[in-house]
Image: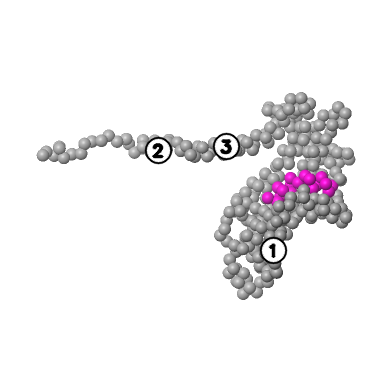
Amino acid sequence: MTDASLQTPHVARAPVSQVMVAERTRLNWGVVGDHLILIAGSLFMILPVALAFITSTHDPVTIHREGLQYLPGDRLVETYSTVLFTGTGFTGKVNGLSMMMNSLILGLGFALGKIAISMMAAYAIVYFRIPFATLAFWAIFTTLLLPLEVRILPSYEIVQRMGLANSYTGLIVPLIASATGTFYFRQFFKSVPDELLEAARIDGAGPVKFFIDILVPLSKTMIAAIFIIMFVYGWNQYLWPTLITTDESLFTLVRGIKQILQVWIGSNIPEYGQAMALAVLAMLPPVIVVIIFQSWFIKGLTESDK
């Protein structure tokens, strides 16, 4: 046999660079499908807001005659400056800025109040040997089955008899108890290692010091998560502020939108553009809060290692 017969037949191979390019250009249809679903969901959420913003730039006659608008109008600056700075209502002293401030006070009051009450309730349930503590927790938890509408009449009666109607106290205090917050903080505290409690006792830390110096710093991500949920809940409140306040100086943004649309007097047309502008403005603070606390919100609801 000759040396030529022992040689391996030559096989043409593509250069390595061409193979790598081909692999890079190969589409991953699963990833493409995931992105298409995300884009469709984003458009489904964003389009109504965009339509509200575009419609707010038109005059009320055009909106009343033609409905929602798909192209920007020429009343952007006029509409939003009127909404923010011009007094409206029966007194003529209420504007968008004052209503936004009321909504902000209500949202912050709800969020901070619910966090404080929920943390203290969960701390007592987890770390104190209270008789029937488990029963008390489940009694608190069952209140999740009772929405505000179920208990709104007795709550209103109590607030009215205490003389707290038409006040920030009457708006905030009756609703700051939160079964949702108590549940989340209880689960969080139960996951804290017992060694931390033993170490705090050895160092001479009492119940208050252990709560403030150890549990509160550990709970910052959970606090951020609950803060977002409760702030948005308080900011979007409509039924309770409508029932408990008749003073225009306490009107919130959500209440102001309804007030603008109730102008069917004679031949007057409601200021649809201003109502849309208020709706857009009402979305901004919750969006800003979510963007700021987004990473903490995710960590607070998902992390388990302390």
Image height of 263 relative to 203, above or below: above
Q: Are marks 3 and 2 in contact (CB under 8 Å)?
A: no
Residue 113 placement: quadrant = bottom right
What amino acid does circle 1 point to?
A: Leu
Residue 39 bears which disc, if any? 3
Q: Residues within 10 Å of mark 2 (few under 14, many from 20)?
A: few
Residue 299 pos. (x, y %): 59, 53
Give the mark nearer the N terminus: 3 vs 2: 2
Residue located beneath label 1 in the image: 135
Q: Looking at the magenta stretch, what is its main secondary structure?
A: helix
Residue located beneath label 2 in the image: 23
Q: Which region is colored magenta?
A: 229-245
Residue toward you, 44 or 26: 44
What amino acid does circle 3 point to?
A: Ile
Image height of 23 relative to 70, above or below: below
Residue toward you, 20 or 301: 301
Residue 278 pos. (x, y %): 76, 38
Q: Nearer the viewer, mark 3 or mark 2?
A: 3
Q: Secondary structure at mark 3?
A: helix
Q: Are marks 1 and 3 in contact (CB under 8 Å)?
A: no
Q: Nearer the viewer, mark 1 or mark 2?
A: 1
Q: Residues within 10 Å of mark 3 (few under 14, many from 20)?
A: few
Residue 247 pos. (x, y %): 86, 45
Which quadrant is home to the N terminus?
top left
User: Does residue 120 appear anywhere in the picture?
Assistant: no
Image height of 95 relative to 299, above or below: above
Tell me the distance, in whole angstroms, between the alpha carbons under discs 3 and 2: 26 Å
Give the mark nearer the N terminus: 1 vs 2: 2
Residue toward you, 113 or 104: 113
Q: Residue at x 86, y 45 (%)?
A: 246
